[in-house]
């Protein structure tokens, strides 16, 4: 992860944070960045000052879910729903 990917509302995870965190505020501090975020499962506020090496080990979740899933499983799920509704 790079400094330009760190922006509000992004979802990040890594060894620095105990859970998936939504970034609320990003404050540049010289060569480092202070990240203030909210944990998605506990709603606790997490603050961390990270340098470039620590940013590199963080993972950023995509803003939009990709549509590259397994099409055969999707069709099987839709068929199961259709049969369930037809039975009712």
Image (cartoon, rainbow, N blue to C red):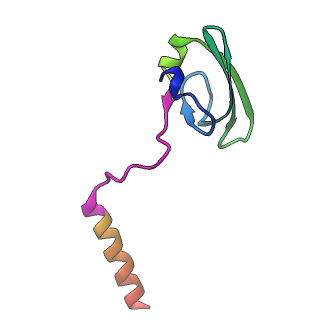
Please tell me which residue is depicted at 48% across the width and 29% down the height of the picture: 59
Picture quadrant of residue 76? bottom left
Q: Is residue 75 above or below residue 4?
A: below
Residue 86 quadrant? bottom left
Q: Is residue 28 above or below residue 20?
A: above
Residue 62 placement (x, y as % from top left): 46, 41
Q: Position of residue 57 (x, y in %)?
A: 48, 20
Q: Which residues are magenta?
A: 59-73
Q: Main secondary structure of the magenta part?
A: loop
Residue 72 sits inside the magenta stretch: yes
Residue 19 in the figure: left or right of residue 1: right
Q: Is residue 5 left or right of residue 79?
A: right
Q: Residue at x 62, y 26 (%)?
A: 17
Whole-percent x, y for residue 42 in the image:
71, 41
The x, y position of residue 52, in whole percent, is: 53, 12
Q: Residue at x 65, y 8 (%)?
A: 30
> Is 43 on the left-hand or right-hand side of 79?
right
């Amino acid at each position: 992860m790079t400094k330009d990917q760190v922006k509000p509302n992004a979802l990040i995870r890594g060894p620095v944070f105990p859970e998936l965190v939504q970034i609320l505020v990003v404050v540049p501090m010289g060569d480092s960045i202070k990240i203030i975020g909210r944990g998605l499962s506990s709603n606790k506020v997490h603050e961390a000052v990270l340098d470039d090496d620590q940013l590199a080990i963080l993972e950023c979740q995509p803003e939009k879910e990709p549509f590259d899933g397994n099409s055969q499983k999707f069709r099987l799920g839709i068929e199961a729903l259709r049969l369930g509704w037809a039975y009712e």
